[in-house]
Image: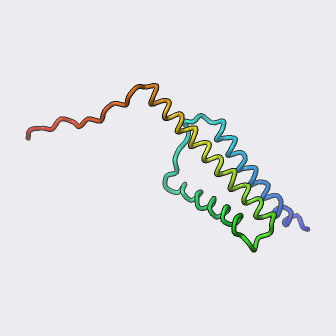
Amino acid sequence: MSLWEVIWRIGLPLLVVCCAATAVSIAVSDPPDKFSRPRGWQWAWLGVWLLMAGEAAFGDDRPWFERAWKGTAALLVAVAAAVAAWRHYRWWRNSRLAGGSPRPITRPPRSDS
C-alpha cells in the first residue's frame, strides 16, 4: 500500500472523526450564548451531514470501514449540534426568566396628519 493510499484510506477518515469529536468538545465547553443558528451558506453543512449519514446507512457499495467512519462522524456532528442547541435554549430560557417578563411590544403613536 502506497503512502497516498494510507493517507486516503486511514488518515483522512481519522482526521474527519477527530474534527467531529472536537466539534462535540467545543459544543460542550463553549458558552451557550455563542451558539448561532445556520444562516445562508451554513445550511450546506446540513447537506454534508445528510450525505455522510446516508452513505453510512444506505451505502451498500461502500466498504464497511468507510461506512463506519462516516457514520461515526455523522453521529458526532449530530450530537454536537444537539448539545449546542439544547444548551443555548436552556441559557435563553433562564435569561428570560431571570430578567422578568419581556417588555410588551408597543406601536409608536400615530400622527394626526
**Where 36 falls versus 44 (above or below)?**
above
Looking at the image, which residue sits at the far right?
1
Name the spot of residue 40 as percent of width and height, x first.
49, 55
Of 86 and 113, nearer the camera is 86
**Where 49 falls versus 19 (above or below)?**
below
Name the spot of residue 112 as percent of width and height, x first.
9, 38
- Please name the colour scheme applied to the rendered image: rainbow
Residue at 75% x, 53% y is 17
Of 1 and 101, nearer the camera is 101
**Where 9 falls versus 78 (above or below)?**
below
Residue at 65% x, 46% y is 80
* Left or right: 70 in relation to 48: right
**In terms of image quadrants, where is residue 102?**
top left
Of 12 and 93, nearer the camera is 93
On-image quarter of the N terminus: bottom right
Name the spot of residue 105 as percent of width and height, x first.
29, 35
* Left or right: 20 in relation to 38: right
Residue at 49% x, 35% y is 92
Q: How many labels does the image show?
A: 0
* Left or right: 60 in relation to 93: right
Name the spot of residue 9 as percent of width and height, x first.
82, 64
**In terms of image quadrants, where is residue 54?**
bottom right
